[in-house]
Amino acid sequence: MDPNERKGWTSIITPDDLDTHMANIGQAQANAGMIKQMFKEHPCGPRVWAPGGGTCQMLDYITLADLGDQVELTLTDINSSFLEKAKRRLDRFQQARYELFIDDIEETSLKRSYDGVLVVLVLQHVEWQKALDSVISTEPDNLYIIIQEQFANGNPISQDRELPPSIKKFSKYAAGKLVPRIKLCNYISRREYEFAKEYKREVQDEKTMAGFVFTRLPTPKKHINTL
């Protein structure tokens, strides 16, 4: 991760400013709607990991059950204050099964495998190929990925609206670099996953939230010579 990006996400952006900004431009609502649809149409087992999951703002618009009836959510981030707010959201749900960890998506310390991994608007802020390799090391059956798309000359963080203070400060020196969908899909397809479906939601500032589901290819059975 670029040092400016890391500084922004660990010591500049506040949880409340992040949530306010995402809701104001409609990205939080759009992403939550896509997540619900993706998991409904492409369900996975109960073990779901959301790296870079931040404050878990999606739970203002959907429920844990939308990820699966018996979901066991692991949510990680590099910012402990984001995870504290995520915990307050998760605790709204009775008998919620979840784990929260400080962890870096580019070099995860998680050792278990997951049924599904949900990556929402994270790849543009990190070394995305390295992050995907780290995610795929947990051998998920399904990958649920949401990226941001817009005109080539657009700024990932709009400068034409009033931004919350910490977001405005962050945008002056680090705003991420959008990941082209073709490169993303090609990279994942070379790692024993196949494209399943695309989702789209238009949001403010001429931006599009683009969601992709990838499913893991079955492992070929080894030929056993019985002679």
Image (tube, rainbow, N blue to C red):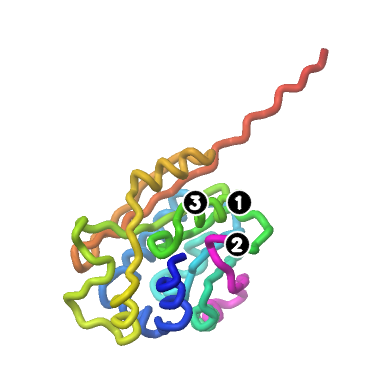
> Which quadrant of the figure has residue 187?
top left
Tag of residue 15: none
Mark 3: which amino acid?
Leu
Residue shown at the point (78%, 18%) measured from the top left? 225
Considering only vertical position in the picture, is 183 above or below 94? above
Q: CA distance from mark 1 to mark 3?
A: 12 Å
- Residue at horizontal 41 percent and vertical 84 percent from the top: 14
Rounded to the nearest angstrom, the CA distance separating label 1 from label 2 is 9 Å
Q: Position of residue 12 (x, y in %)?
A: 41, 83
Comparing labels 3 and 2, the label whose residue is closer to the camera: 2
Magenta region includes residue 61: no
Q: Nearer the viewer, residue 145 or 98?
A: 145
Q: Nearer the viewer, mark 1 or mark 3?
A: 1
58 w.r.t. 11: above or below: above
Magenta residues (range): 89-108
In the rendered structure, which amino acid carries the disc numbered 1? Ser
Residue where numbered disc 1 is placed = 137
